[in-house]
Amino acid sequence: MHIITGDFNAHNPLWSDTDKLCAIGTQVQYWIDNNNLVIHNTGKPTRLDPNRNSTSAIDLTITTTNISTQTQWHVHDDNWGSDHLPIFIDIQQKPLTEESTQHNPTWSYNRADWQEYQKLGTLIDTTQMEHHDINKFNNTLTKAIVTLANKTIPKTKAYNKPSVPWWNKGIQIKRQKRKQLLRKSANIQNYSPNIELPEMKQRSPLSKQKPNHGALSQAP
């Protein structure tokens, strides 16, 4: 959703009630057509020229198509002491309302009874899970794990959290990407490969050129 408005100083019959056309007006029309925009000027003058006793429509209001049908445009009759007439832009959109976000119950692993979980797990007859169909085997195994979890891992309570009116899907996606980048950054910082490298002593070029007199004195 974008609204573009201002003094373009552009003349074009597309938004004026005259036949005057200038180079800037041609460029603006080309830009509007190529970017699938909508101009809301009706041809009514937006500027008064007291020196020439003339009027012109050079103050343009342009919007994207997703709000074009909801936008109303009109010029005020009183110039309020300016050579430009006030322009009123009314976008009739429904106000954003706060919608509560449903948070479903989740496993509370820090309160789990892992000893009981392991004990009950040893009692499962795994031979009954064996199946040539991988999908059926997966369903049986998943059901067994969930059954164990329901018996030994408590869940949080479901609750409704009111959402703020400025929150939207785009912000949610950016927030998720930010968390992914933070986790990736933490993994890189904590990464320490367990590789033991042999200690290597650097020798300067001058030391390499010096003869090893100790080695010569030990020779027979």
Image (cartoon, helix red, strand yellow):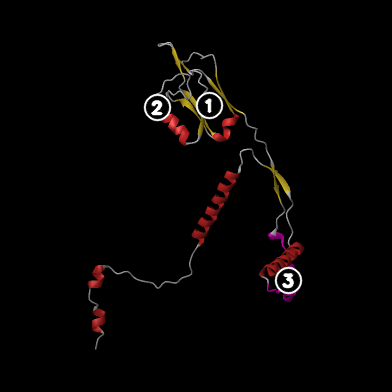
Can you identify the residue that label 2 sits on?
24
Q: Secondary structure at mark 1?
A: loop
Q: Amino acid at mark 2?
A: Ile
- Answer whether residue 155 is magenta in the image: no
Is the residue under label 1 in contact with that under label 2 (CB below 8 Å)? Answer: no
Q: Rounded to the nearest whole Å, what is the CA distance between mark 3 and mark 1?
A: 70 Å
Residue placed furthest toward the bottom: 220
Region in magenta: 109-132
Q: Nearer the viewer, mark 3 or mark 1?
A: 1
Q: Which image quarter: residue 110?
A: bottom right
Q: Is residue 107 above or below residue 16?
A: below
Q: Magenta-highlighted stretch: main secondary structure?
A: helix
Q: Secondary structure at mark 3?
A: helix
Can you identify the residue that label 1 sits on?
40
Q: Which sits earlier in the primary sequence, circle 3 or circle 2? A: 2
Q: Is residue 125 above or below residue 220?
A: above
